[in-house]
Image (tube, rainbow, N blue to C red):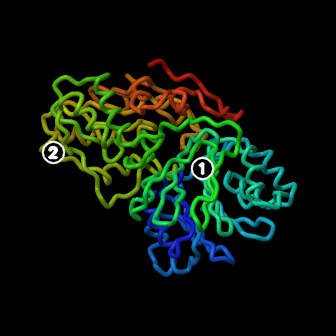
Amino acid sequence: MCGIYGMAGNDNVAHQISLGLYDLQHRGEQAAGIATFDGEQIHIHKDGGLVTKVFEDEETLRNLPGRFGIGHVLYSTVGKSGETKQTRTFQPLIGDFHGRPFALAHNGNLINLDPLRVEAEARGYKFQSKVSDTEVMVALIATSPEIDFTEALLKILPKLDGAFSLAILYGDKIFGIRDRHGIRPLCICQLGNHFIIASEECAGHSLGAKFVRECRPGEMVILGTDGIERSFLWLDSASLRLCIVELIYFARPDSTIGGRRVYLYRENAGYEVAIEHPVVGAQLVSSVPESGAIYNYGVSKALGVDVRRAISRNRYFAPRTFILPRDTDKKALQSAKFFILVELVHGRVIIITEDSIIRCNVGPAVVMMLRSAGAAEVHMRVGSSPICYPCFLGIDIPTQIELIAAKRTVQEIEKDELHVDSLGYLSLEGMIRATGLPKENLCLGCFTGEYPIAPPKDLVLKKPPSV
């Protein structure tokens, strides 16, 4: 999962893109970059860290002239084997198409890349990274025999296997492209006479841009000086299989994903899980910030229990724990990240809400802090089902062994890992109801082991323990 952004025809494009990337920061915190075109050449700046760090200097933005540009925030995923961490190939990446530069930003993850690397190398491309799926796309474009850039894309896109939403800068054009299943989101916004391609609707909020619509699965949108120049499907058939984790965790609550406000899923899911797993005698419900936020309002509505902010987050502790680098000691960060209001907790029966439990890094520390503050009982309610299977489509859970629900039953997680008085996961049926979408329009692979795209041949899936 990453965030991508593209804008056409704006005189202050680099500054506008930087503001858009602030609104997409939740989609990636490891690096950020912007590429612009000034009519003759592409200018680029990218570095590791948050957008505020990478573009903290106005001089940096002034050195990115042009009226067309794309941007990217990075959340790196793991290479195809699940054993080697993907190198930090910061984006956008730059390529050369028959003597003219282009830049490409990518959100998603591609698989089965070896034949495509061989194809590009046979045409003379020299790879800088052994694992970057984004560079494979750059290589295929750079070595395409097609003379027309759009025709080159139309020949390449059907070869790509996996999930991808793309923003491509070529001359005075911005290309927005979504994969055939629309697994990762992509939308169109409008700022005055200028159009924007972005991962989420919220990317236009700081600018005051108006949400136009979501891109369709399998759609290519071409933006130019005069707005949307073309929009069409790049393949004969397409069908929506939206990643449900976008609604559960990744997307910002004020975005529209799959035709629904993300906020509504989280509130609905909280309501559903409370109905499925009520807590008798509960005195308050509090979210685990920020991941469990909004779910608590659904629980409150279902059970008639007051929402109180018993768990607060250090506002200067910025990172989202799940999207931190994989080598981070995430458990050790919790005491710095959270603090408990003892007066609200002591002697009371409380419900805490979470969006999901993946590796069980956060929950145990939070529960221990609540116990230390004198909570009489601690019950956890989760706005999703147990995540039992890996993801190869853009989420950093490439191996099944790292998933707590793939190794332990719900009862074992409850008693041996979290040490809560009760643990309630939302059922698969409850998740689907909360989305307001048909099951056939969702990717539920990390919950069911059934994916819209056949998994890599070397990915071994094991049935999780009975729940």
Judge from the rendering whether residue 127 lies leftward or rightward of residue 54; answer left or right.
right
> Which mark is drawn over residue 165?
1
> Which residue shows up at 38% across the image and 27% down it?
426
Closer to us: 396 or 199: 199
The nearer-to-camera label among 2 and 1 is 1
For the point 44% across and 28% down, which residue is it?
Answer: 432
How would you rate the neighbour count of disc 1 (Cα within 10 Å): few for under 14, some for 14-19, many for 20 or more? many
x, y percent for residue 151: 77, 54
In the displayed structure image, the side of residue 213 where residue 95 appears, left or right: right
Could you say which quadrant of the image residue 344 lies in? top left
Q: Nearer the viewer, residue 250 or 408?
A: 250
Callout 2: SS: helix
Helix, strand or loop at mark 1 = strand
Residue 229 shown left or right of residue 149 in the figure:
left
Q: Residues within 10 Å of mark 2 (few under 14, many from 20)?
A: some
Image point (35%, 42%), residue name:
263
Residue visible at 21% across and 28% down in the picture = 303
Which image quarter holds the C terminus?
top left
According to the picture, the residue beneath numbered tag 2 turns out to be 342
Q: Label 1 amino acid?
A: Ser
Identity, as a three-letter code, of the amino acid under mark 2: Val
Position of residue 241 in the picture relative to residue 172 (left or right): left
Image coordinates for residue 458, horizontal then vertical, percent: 70, 34
Residue 61 position, x and y percent, is 51, 76
